[in-house]
Amino acid sequence: ISISVLLLAVMAASPSALSAAEIREYSIPEFVAAKAQWSRWTGETIRVEGRYRSFSPNAMQFQKCDLFFYLPRDINRPLGRSRTLEVIGQLKEDRNGLSFRVDSLRLLPEDNELFHLRRRTLPEEDPNPWYELGKQTLQRGRFYEDALLAKLGEETLADGLQIEKGRRKNVDAKFLQSLASKAAQLGLDDDVRLPYVHEALRQQWQEQKTADEPDYISLRKKLSSDLPGAAMLLTSLTGKRFDDYRRSPIETFNKSTSHALKQRSRLFYLEVARAEY
């Protein structure tokens, strides 16, 4: 995919001010989150990128950022469908408050396009770059209230968890619980987290069935606390969704909808209860 990148640059009086080692770099979500630090950064060279909401001959503003970015003369509105810009300049403070004086500006690819370009370069066996891209994309999607971008971030994080699991030689219950905890820390939904919890509990269930003195009570309590739906009442225990689970519990659970997850959690609980009594 070819990307048309428009570069409009008006260099600062001192070229050394743009030394890479001296430039602070922020996305707009990061820049806005650090608003309390802005007054301390006056005079420093800063690179900021994000989606712009307004562009006039003299100034521009980024979405969800109330700061004005004042432009050099003869800078025209960037052409192209993308609304993502990168600017380099300095924060200035005077009696009117803080503003940003832009030295250079360029148009960047749209977020979705840039995401797919970056995703293609991710290694297949290292989960960390997947986590990094996923977190950045999810944060950006939530900041801009962009549901599609946020979904891409969530999917990338979920892929990272699967890669981490695939690299593990001994996928035991403790490791699966650690993946479930990581999914929660990453802000992923239960649809991603619970399959790891369920698989860990299935392993513990297999261990209990072969133990000399199985502790079914503790396992049932853990099922009730860790799997939403394990304590719910079911009007029926027949049908394809239940038969599929009995034949292949882990695979079936992993492909379940949110409602089916609860039903199959209850079926698991009843399986343990029957063995106990």
Image (cartoon, rainbow, N blue to C red):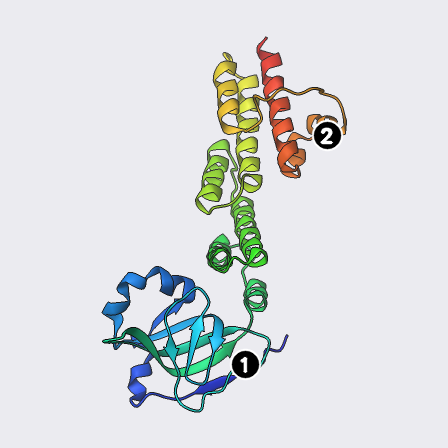
Instruction: Work out whether residue 235 or residue 145 is closer to the camera in this orientation and state it.
Output: 145
Q: What element carries label 1?
A: loop
Q: Where is residue 150 in the image (x, y as percent from the top left)?
A: 54, 55
Considering every residue shown, the one lying at the far front of the view is 96
Look at mark 2 in the image and give the residue it sits on. 241
Seen in the picture, residue 169 relative to 235 is either above or below; the reply is: below
Identify which residue is drawn at 53% across, 44% down: 165
Q: Quadrant of residue 114?
A: bottom right
- What is the three-letter code of the residue carrying label 1? Val
Name the spot of residue 156 as percent of width and height, x first: 55, 54
Q: Whole-Å distance between the Cαs marked 1 and 2?
A: 51 Å
Q: Which residue, as the protein is rendered here, is positioned at the far top?
A: 277
**What SS does tag 2 mark?**
helix
Front-most of 259 and 71? 71
Furthest residue toward right: 239
The residue drawn where x is 32% and y is 63% is: 35
Front in this rendered view, residue 208 or 1: 1
Q: Which of marks 1 and 2 is nearer the N terminus?
A: 1
**In the rendered image, which quarter is residue 20 located in?**
bottom left
Kindly identify the residue that appears in the image at 57 percent across and 68 percent down: 117
- Can you tell which quarter of the image residue 29 is in? bottom left
**Label 2 crowding class (10 Å Cα cut-off): few <14, some 14-19, many 20+?**
some
In which quadrant of the rendered image does the C terminus lie? Answer: top right
Identify the amino acid type marked 2. Answer: Arg
How far across and down, in percent of the image, does residue 5 sit?
54, 81
Q: Decide: is 19 above or below 238.
A: below
Is the N terminus in the top left, top right, bottom left or bottom right quadrant? bottom right
Q: Mark 1 points at which residue?
A: 5
Image marks 1 and 2: residues in contact by CB distance under 8 Å: no
